[in-house]
Amino acid sequence: MNAAQDKFKNFEHIFFPKSIAVVGASAHEHKLGNGFLGALVHAGYKGKLYAVNPAGGNIFGLDVYPSVQAIPGPVEYVIVVIPRQGVLKLLDDCAEKGVKAVQFFTAGFSECGEEKWKQVEQEMVKKARAGGFRIVGPNCVGVYSPANIQPLGFIDKVGEVGPVAFVAQSGGHAERFLEYGLSRGIGFSKAVSFGNGSDLDSSDYFEYLASDPQTQILASYLEGVKDGRRLFQLIKEINKTKPAVIWKGGRTKAGAQAAASHTASLAASDAVWTGALRQAGAIKVESLEEMGDTVQILHHLGKFRGNRVCILAGLTGGGGGESVSATDACVGTGLEVPPFDEDTRTRLSAIVRQEGTIQRNPLDIGGLGSNLDILGNTLQLLDSTTNMDLLILNINVGSILRMSPPGRLWEMMSLFVEFKRNSKKPLVVVSYPGLSEANRLEVEDFLAKASVPVFPTIDRAARALMNTLGYWEFRDRLEQDGGRPCIDKETHVRSADN
Amino acid sequence: MNAAQDKFKNFEHIFFPKSIAVVGASAHEHKLGNGFLGALVHAGYKGKLYAVNPAGGNIFGLDVYPSVQAIPGPVEYVIVVIPRQGVLKLLDDCAEKGVKAVQFFTAGFSECGEEKWKQVEQEMVKKARAGGFRIVGPNCVGVYSPANIQPLGFIDKVGEVGPVAFVAQSGGHAERFLEYGLSRGIGFSKAVSFGNGSDLDSSDYFEYLASDPQTQILASYLEGVKDGRRLFQLIKEINKTKPAVIWKGGRTKAGAQAAASHTASLAASDAVWTGALRQAGAIKVESLEEMGDTVQILHHLGKFRGNRVCILAGLTGGGGGESVSATDACVGTGLEVPPFDEDTRTRLSAIVRQEGTIQRNPLDIGGLGSNLDILGNTLQLLDSTTNMDLLILNINVGSILRMSPPGRLWEMMSLFVEFKRNSKKPLVVVSYPGLSEANRLEVEDFLAKASVPVFPTIDRAARALMNTLGYWEFRDRLEQDGGRPCIDKETHVRSADN
């Protein structure tokens, strides 16, 4: 076995272990050691599952072993939820048992700023090296691997397997991003929150995911990096075939100080990250929402070209103001909202009456959207326009319910989904919050399951579309250049000056 | 009666009519003429309500009259939902009947670009002048007046009466803003969507609301204005005592073209609006969400000073990443996130353990937030800090449910509300969407009813806080200058150059 294969074998132990022990397992509900074990049990982890606690007993029907060594069979992966005082002894036990990887929720090491605990963290890595196993964390929520039914932290379910991998230097953001993804029909290949990354760092996970055939889209929240040159080189390689969406926490000075306290990260300046990520062709985002929105577009729309949007402003009235603000939002972000051509206008006037409608782009069809024939014919017409690349539909579920016969909402949404299956242009829906929230959530779930991207504001939709368009343009340039890495002039000049 | 009193009397007919007739009332559910009448019936309008339709019959238990003249009693306000061909004849009927104001949902006039219908719109105004009544619209959803149980359009309920007035040149945005407000505990004095504003324009409504004692906060969506000088002078006057939040649609060239098609508005450039609104001390916003968010802060927090925020990053774990991104969002917007002083750090270390917590600002108390004693003591301590002005609490309802005993979520939220009642510092909550949406919506409703501002992202919270802080600083400067209108240097210089 060569070095590369060996390296990937480490990750197989992390993302596909056949046995897991939770050390610090607790019978007390809502204790941390109960939550980790409970999530594995309730999600339905298929491998051998063991609980470890000196107190013994039985939790979720599992016998509790006093130590890792006391477990009868082999243990591939260990999840640690004990106080920091016990971690070095535990690692000796793990080495003796022959485990392959250890994940530490346990925190209070280098990130707390005390020399003593910084040294303990270094000692942990030494023990891992000597014992021939790897460490995930410490100070992390750890792994999510739906194909192996490994849930993330306390979230006791796994979603569909899909193309998105997420690498996060924050357990909270990992959970929130997973929640975003699961509620928007996004499938994950695997995710990991790696905390302090004392052994395996972002670069290690990126390297594995670069060659992981299940991963086609990489998203990451980072606070710092040990070896920036290696990371950016990896991102540049990844971006040639898989879009990388990077959210760098600590872009402000105060934010960087918070990052140092969180994961002991020493961050380079935001300008350095911005330049390096741009040169690597990565999509740099500034919030969890923007990261999720961008991944949603990448996941649901795949590759598409062209920034000219066709906007259906309102379906059941109220589309006039929306036509103005949607245009402002799109054009303000860099999308184009071109006028309909003569042919489209002529055909449109045969579908909708003049009174109370605005027959331009954005199109306001007054209250006619709840007429399924008119809605269907209008969508077909918009899909056939030759000078537009994308379709954005604005919906207000409350308004549809007020203005339409019972059941019509679902007929309209089914029509959207059917249209999406056959349409030539990518379709995006903006669904506004209001007074019919339960119905709105049902609608969004329905659309998400059909891989229709849904956003709560037009601004967020426009930004996500521009982010992805920028990436696909980067890929086009790369292909035109015959695969030569794209040099960003601005960054290039700046580094030449140094 | 002097001219000013007479002018305000017009508005009393619009916002407090004792009788309303819906012309074009329909028995067919989900027809427009059914929706307007139904909303009045279901909301419980207390005045005399009449239905008019040549077809006759009975709708919602009301006799249908063939014409306005056929109504036996007096009619103060008329809502028109008939095709445009019939409006001039109807206005003759209204004049004969002695009505005081007529609201036109009917559209297809100057905004459609045809000379014929532009002239009809002018003729309508002439008939109103001659008949001694006023027109609301045309091309609008009209009035919302909760004190008089006048619902907006098809929304068949009215909320609490409160200090916010909304003036909108779009029915759709009026509805959406009302939905935002009702779901966030915002009380309205009155709202109006005035469409083309052929008779009464934004300036007229602003003038009335400036002297309306029920109105303490003015929000407005505008696409254009007939007399800019008058409008800006009014906004300048209003801002001396009531914050005006203005969203100007059509800030991009393409958006302005959409506005021309929507309400026949000819917009001045965005730079002119920006300069004039800044000089008038108005809060200029760029989206419906930003308008709602800003009004939410104004409504719930009243006047406050200081941009130094104290952030509680996470209550039940996952606060580490949040502490970084919340800092970035706040500092990036212009808020400050100062460090705790020595005394606070000392007292804090007596409340929360070191391991797994980050005892700085933002504060991450690890998973300890579900311990009510610790949570309460922590909030009290943060409230007592002398170098902070505001408190922002981050919550993830899904995480709280996963990490806490049953029922604890509501105990924590009750603790928030109790804390808010007695706290010295204004309190803002950021509540992240996730996988527990039904519970999240319940929580947000509970907090909103207790006048706690709630936002779905930290970026939106930070922006809204900065917007309102800017306004209160403007007021402070104004008072220091002894009431002299504040001259904005940048704008002043620019206009001096012309």
Image (cartoon, coloured by chain):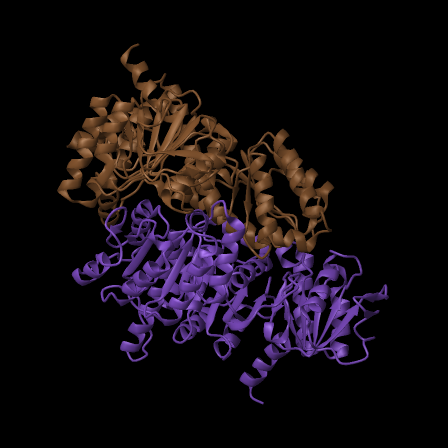
Chain colours: A brown, B purple
Instruction: Give the residue displayed 18% in from the left and 63% down from the top.
Output: B343
Which image quarter is the N terminus of chain A in? top left
Q: Is residue A91 above or below residue A28?
A: above
Q: Position of residue A449 (x, y in %)?
A: 57, 36
Q: Of residues A221 and B354, which is closer to you in this image?
A: B354
The answer to whether residue A361 is seen in the rendering is no
Q: Is residue A267 above or below residue B493?
A: above
The residue at the far bottom in this view is: B1
The answer to whether residue A462 is seen in the rendering is yes
Horizontally, residue A324 falls left or right of residue B235, namely right
Q: Position of residue B494 (x, y in %)?
A: 31, 61
Instruction: Give the residue displayed 77% in from the left and 78% down from the top.
Output: B96
Instruction: Give the residue displayed 28% in from the left and 27% down from the top.
Output: A94
Choose top left, top right, bottom left or bottom right for residue A86. Answer: top left
Q: Position of residue A288 (x, y in %)?
A: 39, 43
Q: Of residues A330 and B98, which is closer to you in this image?
A: A330
The residue at the far left in this view is: A115
Q: How many marks?
A: 0
Q: Is residue B333 above or below residue A83?
A: below
Horizontally, residue A209 falls left or right of residue A423, namely left
Q: Of residues A440 and B56, which is closer to you in this image?
A: A440
Q: Position of residue B219 (x, y in %)?
A: 48, 66
Which image quarter is the C terminus of chain A in? top left
